[in-house]
Image (cartoon, rainbow, N blue to C red):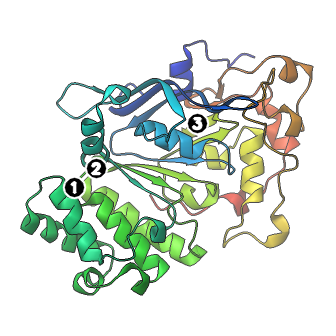
């Protein structure tokens, strides 16, 4: 096709913008687990750059590899899993760090002070026998932070998240609502002033109204503290109101990457369009929802060609025999898609963009 991007896999996946400052770079990042029936590859040679002070949304179905991508960024894949490839972090004004080469001591410091992570469900992240104050104090002491200064930051962060600092600090996790617990966890993740915040389905356990409320607060925090945010979710319409850029994952690799507005207004991979139809949101009537037929591929089984082909209405022998490279969408160098027939996706997967397009708040 005319718009095939003839460049390295790294540049294809990143839709490179030379004017932007990269803070985190993954090259050929792969996560594998050895199983009785073979090797399970749950992240498949991903190339991706995260830009400084952006909010990037990583979206896809459950099991698409989103969480493994997040864990690879922090070299936090649990054994017997292994991460290969390259994960580099670029502190401002310092030499880059090879994350996969850090010692255990360096990793513990890195995961709180440089890149922090918020997991789904605050109840599983807090110790039920310890007060919220105890969690903050323990974290500050473990990193040799001044306790008085650190608790002052704690109160400011809790206030930024519209929580009463003293009431929350004196509470135990079970005494807080789900929304309050999740906001307290976000504050805890930021207390050591990291540059990057990775959030893995942080609002999935909350109702839609609370999700939107927390995303609005997160946008304010990102601006105030000049954070870089990687937001992992299955809910494309929800994160589209927050993110500057979106990366759509399917079968453990990236399928479409680009500016949020471009992807939402012109989704060009059949899978991206199917995701927008499948996820409920407050603005879309229920009769517009349509589940994606079929199932995602087995991470142990190898498959020739495009891994989405068995579920794709556009798939032909070319798709089944050879995986597509990234293609520019309508000549937009920042919007790329791995599909031979991206320019026919709008006819193959009809989508009411007025319904699917969320109100972008940024």
Q: How far across and how far down the image is residue 244, in percent?
A: 47, 48
What kind of element bears circle 2?
helix
What kind of element bears circle 1?
loop
Q: Nearer the viewer, residue 245 or 132?
A: 132
Residue at left offset 35%, top offset 82%: 172
Residue at left offset 54%, top offset 35%: 80
Q: What residue is shown with label 1?
A: 192
Work out which quarter of the rendered image holds the C terminus and state it.
Answer: bottom left
- Residue 133 in the figure: left or right of residue 340: left
Q: Residue 112: give its label.
A: 2
Q: How far across and how far down the image is residue 272, in percent?
A: 71, 45
- Residue 138 in the figure: left or right of residue 123: left
**What's the CA distance linking mark 3 and mark 2?**
28 Å
Residue at left offset 82%, top offset 65%: 288
Q: Residue 257: give its label.
A: 3
What kind of element bears circle 3?
strand
**What's the CA distance linking mark 2 and mark 1?**
6 Å
Q: How far across and how far down the image is residue 205, in percent?
A: 57, 70
């Amino acid at each position: 096709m005319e718009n095939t991007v003839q460049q390295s896999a790294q540049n294809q996946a990143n839709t490179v913008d030379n004017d932007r400052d990269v803070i985190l770079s993954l090259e050929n990042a792969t996560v594998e687990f050895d199983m009785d029936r073979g090797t399970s590859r749950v992240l498949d040679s991903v190339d991706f750059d995260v830009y400084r002070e952006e909010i990037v949304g990583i979206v896809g179905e459950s099991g698409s590899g989103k969480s493994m991508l997040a864990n690879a960024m922090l070299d936090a894949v649990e054994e017997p899993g292994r991460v290969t490839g390259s994960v580099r972090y670029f502190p401002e004004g310092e030499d880059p760090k090879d994350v996969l080469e850090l010692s255990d001591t360096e990793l513990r410091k890195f995961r709180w002070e440089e890149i922090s992570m918020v997991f789904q469900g605050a109840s599983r992240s807090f110790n039920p026998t310890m007060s919220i104050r105890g969690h903050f104090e323990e974290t500050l002491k473990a990193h040799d932070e001044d306790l008085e200064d650190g608790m002052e930051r704690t109160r400011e962060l809790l206030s930024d998240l519209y929580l009463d600092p003293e009431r929350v600090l004196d509470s135990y996790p079970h005494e807080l609502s789900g929304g309050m617990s999740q906001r307290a966890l976000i504050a805890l993740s930021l207390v050591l002033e990291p540059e990057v915040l990775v959030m893995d389905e942080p609002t999935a356990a909350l109702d839609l109204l609370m999700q939107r409320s927390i995303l609005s607060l997160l946008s304010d925090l990102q601006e105030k503290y000049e954070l870089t945010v990687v937001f992992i979710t299955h809910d494309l319409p929800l994160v589209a109101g927050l993110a500057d850029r979106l990366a759509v994952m399917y079968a453990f690799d990236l399928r479409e990457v680009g500016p949020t507005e471009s992807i939402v207004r012109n989704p060009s991979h059949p899978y991206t369009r199917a995701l927008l139809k499948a996820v409920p949101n407050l603005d879309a009537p229920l009769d517009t929802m349509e589940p994606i037929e079929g199932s995602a591929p087995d991470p142990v089984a190898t498959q020739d060609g495009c891994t989405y082909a068995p579920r794709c209405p556009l798939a032909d022998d070319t798709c089944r025999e050879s995986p597509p490279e990234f293609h520019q969408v309508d000549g937009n160098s920042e919007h790329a898609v791995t599909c031979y027939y991206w320019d026919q996706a709008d006819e193959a997967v009809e989508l009411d963009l007025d319904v699917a397009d969320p109100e972008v708040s940024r």
